[in-house]
């Protein structure tokens, strides 16, 4: 099925369930892999490792807008009654935001800069939710001046700030949820307890403020579909209280937490709960705040190997969970970064030797140093609990995108900074012998990567993005 980029509004308003055969998506992804391969090869083949000037060999992304579009169709198929508001913080690349705007999505913004970005692309302010329960006074004043009215709150002080700075706001009461199964738990910081909601609704009425609905968030990268059950039920309770206090309750914001791998299951549970508590006959407008769902799988990162060290048995020892070897085609295994394990794991850790497992096997072990790391686009390891999978892109003059051989060589993968925590993977088995000047690639690198990169040690925090896939989408080009 081919759909013009402006078709979302028709889908949402007509509540049409999109039907498309799986082979259509499969063929689209197959074509996308070809476009990504061509873009990667063209870029790295143009780099002369020995003669290039500084910056030419920098890490870069290839972004596939076709994948974003497929995710959009998938959303419309599974959640046709929920209007997505893209979480700009996840990946604020202007081309991505502009493309999503052309598809008719709304936007979840949390700061003046994010509001500016969206408005600069010609998006109407009524398509923005200022989804930040704790807002700077000056930002509130600015939001009012730009016509942004929809915003969240979860406490009495915030209500008084809004009353003083933006009294015409359309407020969504953010409630707490059980987000214990999420990658990034948010309820420890945001959300009003259910018992506190009546007094907040009463105060809002006293202050002359308009509470128009409820918002919740089951946590970024949520994995338990049942988290939606109580959240939706609690939202219905707060809706009823809101009506009792004289508020016109008309919007439910079900937040984010949607990921590519768990989306179908999450959507099924959410859809059932909404059908029970907020059926279409209720007239309630339902929105959501997907971020990584749209961005993660659309971006591939290519990195240059800038240095290599041969590891002899006993040379290097790292702390980390035991038994953490993972082959790139072994989905049951685990890649472990010392940075990730130090930040996010607790309990006993065993020391492991990079060369120990290879001792006596006749195989080599190496430390590879790339021109990007945890202070750059791999910040997702530290801040988003991710463990990117390294793959060989180019080695020995050959191109290996989406190709695996039977050979197995053990590596650890490191970033370029002087900090010892700058490790991407403490041990991984790859299929080729990688040397200085070769290239690695990492898929699913679109969420919480470039947006949190730093300039630590003077390395760049911005990298080129090669955009592909737009030519296949009617009415859109870059």
Image (tube, rainbow, N blue to C red):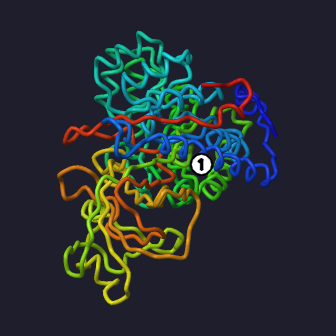
- In this rendering, the answer to whether 339 lies above or below 245 is below
Residue at the image point whose x is 43% and y is 34% from the top: 464
Residue that lies at the very extreme toward the bottom in this rendered image: 360
Number of disc labels: 1
Residue at the image point whose x is 63% and y is 32% from the top: 285
Q: In which quarter of the image is residue 405?
A: bottom right
- The x and y percentages for residue 114 are 41, 26
Residue at the image point whose x is 53% and y is 43% from the top: 235
**Residue 348 seen by the camera:** no
- In this rendering, the answer to whether 347 lies above or below 450 is below
Drawn side of residue 422 relative to residue 323, left or right? left
Q: Which of 98 and 284 is in front in this view?
A: 98
Residue at the image point whose x is 56% and y is 56% from the top: 401
**Quadrant (top left, top right, bottom left, bottom right) of the N terminus:** top right
Drawn side of residue 379 relative to residue 286, left or right? left
Drawn side of residue 117 relative to residue 426, left or right? right
- The x and y percentages for residue 207 are 37, 19
Q: Nearer the viewer, residue 212 or 109?
A: 109
**Residue 158 seen by the camera:** yes
- In this rendering, the answer to whether 388 lies above or below 138 is below
Disc 1, SS = helix
- The x and y percentages for residue 459 are 26, 40
Q: Which of 67 and 151 is in front in this view?
A: 67
**Quadrant (top left, top right, bottom left, bottom right) of the C terminus:** top right
- The x and y percentages for residue 339 are 27, 60
Q: In which quarter of the image is residue 197?
A: top left
Mark 1 burial class by Cα count in 10 Å: few <14, some 14-19, many 20+: some
Residue that lies at the very extreme toward the front in this rendered image: 51
Q: Which of 200 and 159 is in front in this view?
A: 159
Label 1 belongs to which residue? 37
- In this rendering, the answer to whether 260 lies above or below 45 is below
């Amino acid at each position: 099925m081919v759909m013009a980029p402006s078709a979302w509004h028709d889908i949402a308003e007509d509540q049409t369930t999109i039907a498309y055969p799986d082979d259509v998506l499969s063929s689209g992804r197959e074509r996308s892999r070809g476009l990504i391969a061509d873009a990667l090869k063209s870029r790295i083949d143009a780099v002369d490792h020995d003669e290039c000037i500084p910056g030419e060999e920098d890490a870069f992304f290839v972004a596939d807008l076709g994948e974003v579009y497929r995710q959009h169709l998938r959303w419309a198929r599974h959640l046709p009654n929920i209007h997505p508001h893209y979480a700009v913080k996840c990946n604020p690349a202007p081309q991505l935001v502009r493309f999503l705007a052309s598809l008719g999505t709304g936007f979840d913004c949390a700061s003046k800069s994010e509001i500016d970005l969206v408005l600069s692309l010609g998006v109407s302010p009524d398509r923005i939710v200022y989804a930040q329960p704790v807002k700077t006074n000056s930002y509130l004043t600015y939001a009012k001046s730009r016509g942004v009215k929809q915003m969240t709150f979860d406490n009495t002080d915030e209500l008084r700030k809004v009353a003083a700075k933006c009294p015409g706001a359309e407020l969504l009461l953010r409630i707490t949820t059980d987000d214990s199964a999420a990658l990034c738990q948010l309820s420890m910081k945001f959300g009003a307890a259910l018992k506190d909601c009546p007094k907040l609704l009463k105060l809002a009425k006293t202050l002359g403020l308009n509470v128009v609905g409820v918002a919740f968030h089951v946590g970024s990268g949520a994995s338990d579909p049942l988290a939606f059950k109580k959240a939706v039920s609690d939202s219905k309770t707060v809706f009823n209280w809101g009506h009792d206090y004289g508020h016109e309750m008309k919007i439910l914001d079900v937040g984010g937490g949607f990921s590519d791998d768990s989306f179908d299951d999450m959507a099924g549970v959410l859809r059932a709960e909404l059908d029970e508590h907020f059926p279409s006959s209720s007239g309630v407008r339902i929105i959501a705040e997907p971020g990584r769902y749209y961005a993660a799988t659309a971006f591939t990162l290519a990195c240059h190997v800038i240095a290599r060290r041969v590891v002899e048995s006993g040379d290097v020892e790292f702390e980390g969970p035991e038994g953490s070897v993972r082959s790139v085609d072994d989905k049951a295994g685990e890649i472990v970064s010392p940075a990730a394990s130090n930040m996010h794991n607790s309990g006993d850790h065993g020391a492991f030797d990079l060369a120990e497992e290879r001792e006596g096997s006749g195989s080599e072990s190496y430390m590879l140093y790339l021109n990007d790391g945890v202070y750059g686009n791999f910040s997702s390891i530290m801040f988003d609990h991710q463990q990117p999978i390294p793959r060989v892109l180019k080695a020995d003059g050959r191109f290996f995108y989406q190709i695996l051989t039977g050979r197995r060589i053990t590596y650890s993968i490191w970033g370029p900074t002087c900090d010892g925590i700058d490790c991407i993977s403490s041990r991984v088995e790859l299929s080729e012998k990688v040397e200085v000047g070769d290239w690695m690639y990492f898929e699913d690198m679109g969420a919480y990567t470039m947006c949190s990169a730093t300039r630590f040690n003077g390395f760049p925090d911005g990298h080129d993005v090669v955009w592909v896939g737009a030519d296949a989408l009617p009415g859109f080009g870059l």
